[in-house]
Image (spheres, rainbow, N blue to C red):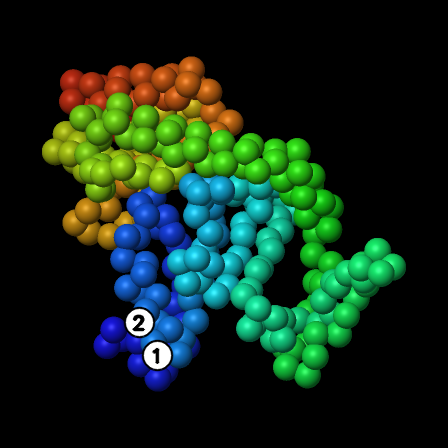
Amino acid sequence: AKLMDKDTVGLMLTNPNTVGLFDEGIEKIEKIVHGKGGLLYYDGANLNASLGIIRPGDAGFDVVHLNLHKTFSTPHGGGGPGAGVIGVKKDLIPYLPTPNVAFNSNRKKYYLSDTGEKSIGMVRAFWSNFSVLVKTYAWILSMGADGLYNTSETSIINANYILAKLKNYYKPAYDRYCGHECTVTGREYKKYGVKTLDIAKRIMDYGMHPPTIYFPHFEPYAEETIMVEPPESESKEMLDKFIEIMVKISDEAKTNPELLTTAP
């Protein structure tokens, strides 16, 4: 609360956070930020755990941005182009870029409407990567409300399944139920001269792309991290194959660490 002073206009949070845990203190955080006149900004990067389950606005968030490549079936990075959307609560609509897309119910047509004098003005990339947005919209319509809920439910189950199977081999950053991703660590293998990087390279020897490593990183919990984010589209067979590989590598790290340090 002391850090939320007159120089702080808002707070950006990912919830579930980067280690895949839902921040149970969000209501307390919301009261602190709004109590000082600030805004809460929701990083929708981890919406995989939230579809049909929670609504950021109900937790007090004022602004939400959605990474369409993370949850809504669109390209990312070099495979792009990428795109994202931003949603705000009603009180912030007058400050959005102009124009807004509005709907005339009488004529049953969409049209461009001037946002008003409080708008931050026009943005150069107003149309964004339009085809990517259309793909997202089509995916949402094809899934429906139940399908979107099942997407998050399956992502959460997949992540917790991996966590339960691997936590005896790779110490979790936090040993509790997670959201759509779990964070385990390779720090127990440093005594064998093996780093998380070596584990990741060894995974490639088995023909599988390694998950994110060394992110997030904060000691003493999230050190030598391996962040596994199995989406709803991964089958149990694929998850079991990954788990089997990780267990084999755990044994190799103890009995023949050179296999890892010289990989791939």
In three-dimensional space, the C-alpha distance between marks 1 and 2, rounded to whole angstroms, equals 6 Å
Residue 60 position in % (x across, y down): 41, 63
Q: Residue furthest right?
A: 107
Q: Residue at x 62, y 48 (%)?
A: 82
Q: Residue at x 30, y 71 (%)?
A: 32
The answer to whether residue 213 is visible is no
Identify the residue position indicated by label 1 in the image. 36
How dense is the environment of label 1, judged by Cα within 10 Å: few (below 14), some, or many (20 and up)? some
Residue 263 position in % (x across, y down): 33, 26
How dense is the environment of label 2, judged by Cα within 10 Å: few (below 14), some, or many (20 and up)? some
Disc 2 on helix, strand or loop? helix
Q: Is residue 132 left or right of residue 178?
A: right
Question: Which quarter of the figure is the C terminus placed in?
Answer: top left
The answer to whether residue 127 is visible is yes
Residue 246 position in % (x across, y down): 30, 23
Please determine whether, in this image, residue 116 is positioned above or below residue 152: below
Q: Nearer the viewer, residue 221 or 111?
A: 111
Q: Nearer the viewer, residue 144 or 258?
A: 144
Please determine whether, in this image, residue 188 is positioned above or below residue 16: above
Quadrant housing residue 138: top right
Please determine whether, in this image, residue 220 is positioned above or below residue 29: above
Label 1 with label 2: CB-CB less than 8 Å: yes
Disc sitting over residue 32 in the figure: 2
Q: Nearer the viewer, residue 181 or 156?
A: 156
